[in-house]
Image (spheres, rainbow, N blue to C red):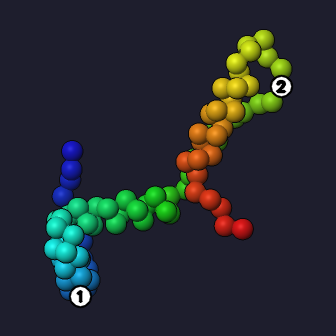
Amino acid sequence: MTARTTILADPDLLDRVARLADRQRTTRTALITAALEAYLAEHEAAPDLPFLAVGRSGHGRLSLDGRSIARREASRRPASPR
């Protein structure tokens, strides 16, 4: 489902969006949506990893599953600047 909104932008910026959309043979809506998604992916805080404990368990696969989950969650986080 999509929703409609109104934005206020400099006319030059909107002209640039329209020209790029024409060159890429897409709509301004698709271009702006992609730009917003890219911006949010870059700037949204990554969720904290769920609690993960280290130790022995009677469940043989627990440590393997935990490592798999930690790797999957770590790959979702953006690299931190050093």
The picture quadrant where one finds residue 50 is top right
Point out residue 74 in the picture as x, y percentages from the top left corner: 63, 46
Residue type at mark 1 is Asp
Q: Which residue position is annotated with label 1? A: 12
Category of crowding for the residue at label 1, using alpha-carbon neighbours closer than 10 angstroms: few (below 14), some (14–19), many (at least 20): few
Query: Is 52 in front, or is 72?
Result: 72
Q: For mark 2, give the secondary structure.
A: loop
Q: Quadrant of the C terminus?
A: bottom right
Query: Is 9 in front, or is 66?
Result: 66
Point out residue 30 in the picture as x, y percentages from the top left corner: 23, 61
Task: Please give the name of the residue rendered at 50% of the width and 58% of the height, measured from the top-left corner.
Answer: 44
Q: Which residue position is annotated with label 2? A: 55
Residue type at mark 2 is Gly
Point out residue 23 in the picture as x, y percentages from the top left corner: 19, 75
Q: CA distance from mark 1 to mark 2?
A: 60 Å
**45 in relation to 31, above or below:** above
Task: Please give the name of the residue rendered at 27% of the width and 67% of the height, measured from the top-left corner.
Answer: 32
Query: Is 6 in front, or is 56?
Result: 56
